[in-house]
């Protein structure tokens, strides 16, 4: 068997040489692709720069979420939530400020979140300093973001007779 292989190699030196060269080229090409330092191109499944995926007319607002550990176990890379304030005062604590807000997990640090809102409504979130508590919603239950309005205070009158 060994002599047959050697006889074949002696008769077909060019074919054997080209085959060996092709194997080395493919081997080094494989090593170059697997050890490459260049990042893969950004796409919807592997976003390197999330800012290119923001729809026109919207803004992505990074927020601090107090229950991020719970969200880590419930949400994938994105979801729909209701936002509540977590202020120190009794008037602002646990006040619902928005419904059906799209929330995204930061691709480079999954315990950080940002919300996607129309640009003209961003001020409704930014007037609250945070941190926020998020409750997960069914994305199909309603469409569109709804911001809560401050309840009107009834004036009390004291009349003296």
Image: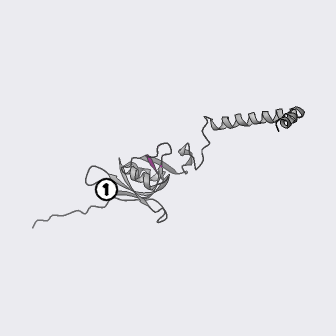
Dot 1 crowding, Cα within 10 Å, few <14, some 14–19, many 20+: some
Q: Which residue is mark 1?
A: 94
Horizontal and vertical percent for residue 50? Answer: 53, 45
Q: Quadrant of residue 25?
A: top right
Residue drawn at (49%, 53%), measured in percent from left and top?
76
Instruction: Give 71 or 85, whichever is nearer the viewer.
Output: 71
Q: Secondary structure at mark 1?
A: strand
Instruction: Give 90 or 119, whichever is nearer the viewer.
Output: 90
Q: Is residue 118 above or below residue 23?
A: below
Q: Is residue 108 rendered magenta in the image?
A: yes
Residue that extends furthest to the left in the rendered view of this protein: 161
Please indicate whether residue 1 sits to the left or right of residue 36 in the image: right
Number of marks in picture: 1
Please indicate whether residue 107 sits to the left or right of residue 67 in the image: right
Give the magenta part as a residue range.
105-115
Horizontal and vertical percent for residue 140? Answer: 49, 64
Please indicate whether residue 47 sits to the left or right of residue 151 in the image: right
Instruction: Give 84 or 156, whichever is nearer the viewer.
Output: 84
């Amino acid at each position: 068997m060994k002599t047959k292989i050697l006889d074949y190699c002696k008769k077909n030196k060019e074919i054997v040489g080209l085959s060996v060269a092709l194997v080395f080229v493919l081997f080094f090409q494989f090593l170059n692709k697997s050890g490459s330092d260049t990042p893969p191109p950004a796409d919807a499944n592997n976003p390197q720069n999330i800012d290119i995926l923001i729809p026109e007319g919207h803004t992505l607002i990074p927020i601090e979420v107090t229950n991020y550990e719970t969200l880590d176990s419930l949400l994938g890379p994105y979801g729909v939530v209701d936002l509540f304030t977590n202020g120190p005062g009794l008037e602002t604590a646990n006040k619902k400020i928005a419904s059906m807000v799209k929330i995204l997990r930061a691709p480079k640090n999954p315990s950080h979140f940002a919300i996607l809102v129309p640009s003209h409504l961003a001020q409704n979130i930014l007037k609250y300093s945070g941190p926020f508590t998020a409750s997960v919603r069914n994305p199909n239950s309603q469409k569109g973001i709804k911001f809560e309005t401050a309840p009107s205070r009834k004036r009390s009158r004291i009349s003296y007779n």
